Amino acid sequence: MSIKRTCIALCLIIVCLFSSVNIAEAYVKEAWRFLSKSVNFKWGDRLTISGSTIRNGWESANAAWKSASSFNFTVSSSSSNILNSWFESSTTKYGRMTTTYNTSTKRVVKFVGEMNAGNSNISKTNVAKSVGVHELGHAIGIGHNSGTSIMNSGRDRTKMHVPQTDDKNGVNAIY
């Protein structure tokens, strides 16, 4: 009887070990962070006038991070950090963030975020906001993942345009 129970127990253990369980992927931290949750930036040369879809996208993205995690980006004409746009005709390139940091302290020295004005989808308000939130997430220190997250490059940009629970957890873990 005990051999039979042992075999059943081993079988159950093996089934549990090899069964597939869907677990949401957790946030991914980049190698850098800001000194605080308050960061200055200036508008790039292609976004000096307010009211464009891309500038509105950046502004909405800032509001979304402030609401979700108290992270605040404020405009300062003397900042070395820049939010801007570029033009490349593409349906797959939405935005990019270049973050420079001190490798010893891991502190961000400068960031340059851009949205692609050549992507026809960027003209949709939620898409521009989604791209802005995603790119600012990189500056904050969160990397790509495949979970239910604004940092998932494969997300539906028309529907997901604010930080998700995983993104908030990432910011809380970093700061």
Image: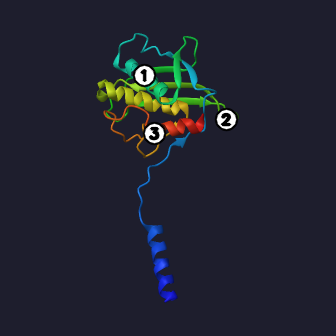
What residue does disc 2 label?
103
> Could you say which is closer to the camera, residue 8 or residue 76?
8
Q: Is residue 152 above or below residue 12?
A: above
Residue type (three-letter) at the residue carrying disc 2: Thr
In the image, residue 110 sits, relative to residue 7, either above or below, namely above
Give the percent coordinates (x, y) of residue 115.
41, 26
Q: Residue at x 53, y 30 (%)?
A: 139
- How many residues crowd around disc 2 within 10 Å: few (fewer than 14), some, or many (20 or more)? few
Seen from this angle, which residue lies furthest right?
Answer: 104
Between 53 and 149, the one nearer to me in the picture: 149
- Residue at 30 percent across and 29 percent down: it is 121
Instruction: Identify which residue, 82 or 164, lies in the foreground.
Output: 164
| SS at circle 2 | loop
x 64%, y 30%: residue: 107
**Who's the residue at 36% across and 35% down the image?**
160
Identify the amino acid type marked 3. Answer: Thr
Question: Number of numbered discs present?
Answer: 3
Answer with mark 1 or mark 3, whichever residue precedes in sequence: 1
Query: Is the residue under label 2 in contact with that under label 1 (CB below 8 Å)?
Result: no
Q: Quadrant of residue 80?
A: top right
Q: Residues within 10 Å of mark 3 (few under 14, many from 20)?
A: some
Q: Which structural element holds mark 3?
A: helix
Pointer 1 local density, CA inside 10 Å: few below 14, some 14–19, many at least 20? many
Q: Earlier in the sequence, mark 1 or mark 2?
A: 1
State the separation of the CA atoms marked 1 and 3: 21 Å
Q: Which residue is mark 3?
A: 165
**Could you say whether the residue bearing mark 1 is in a helix, strand or loop?**
helix
Q: Amino acid at mark 1?
A: Trp
Q: CA distance from mark 2 to mark 3?
A: 29 Å
- Specify the label residue 58 is tagged with: 1
